[in-house]
Image (cartoon, rainbow, N blue to C red):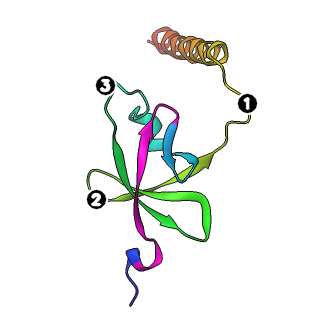
Amino acid sequence: MEKLFDLFPPERAELTENGLFFNGNLYSCSIAIKEQWFLLKEDIFREIPIYVDRNDNEYILVVLNDGSLTIAYRIFDETGMNEQNILIYQETIRKLKQQLKNRKRARK
């Protein structure tokens, strides 16, 4: 019987402010976004254990702190996000959050 590491060899991905960097590609997953992994609070080099599919670089399997796995998908930077676009995006998210809070208050 094959084991996980027979099918998906273990590797390590670098945690960067742009995503999980492995083999020239960036990856992300919902858990990383929810837990804000990419907001690096310190200038410390950090690696995350992963498993890779040698035949498909569109995803990696990320090992979480509790030992479980999640899928991180490859992300593409086709929009050319510059500092101004990032600030506009962040402001839009803040406004949406405020709208949600206001709606919740109005229901009470």
Q: Label 3 near label 1: C-beta < 8 Å?
A: no
Quarter location, residue 42: top left
Image side of residue 55 versus residue 67, left or right:
right
The residue positioned 33% from the left and 26% from the top of the image is 43
The residue positioned 48% from the left and 15% from the top of the image is 104
Image side of residue 10 versus residue 92, left or right:
left
At label 2, the amino acid type is Gly
Nearer to me, 98 or 45: 45
Q: Which residue is mark 2?
A: 67
Q: Quadrant of the N terminus?
A: bottom left
Dot 1: what SS? Answer: loop
Q: Which mark is residue 52?
A: none
Q: Crowding at label 3, few (<14), some or many (≥20) Cα neighbours within 10 Å?
A: few
Q: Which mark is residue 79?
A: 1
At label 1, the amino acid type is Thr
Nearer to me, 49 or 29: 49
Give the residues drawn in magenta, as a range.
6-18
Q: Label 2 near label 3: C-beta < 8 Å?
A: no
The residue positioned 51% from the left and 9% from the top of the image is 102
The residue positioned 50% from the left and 58% from the top of the image is 60
Dot 2: what SS? Answer: loop
Q: How far apart, in angstroms, are the residues tagged by discs 1 and 3?
A: 27 Å
Instruction: Give the mark nearest the N terminus, 1 or 3.
Output: 3
- Relative to 39, say whether 104 is above or below: above
Q: Which residue is mark 3?
A: 42
Q: Position of residue 22 (x, y in %)?
A: 50, 51
Q: Position of residue 78 (x, y in %)?
A: 73, 36
Discs 3/2, front: 3
At label 3, the amino acid type is Glu
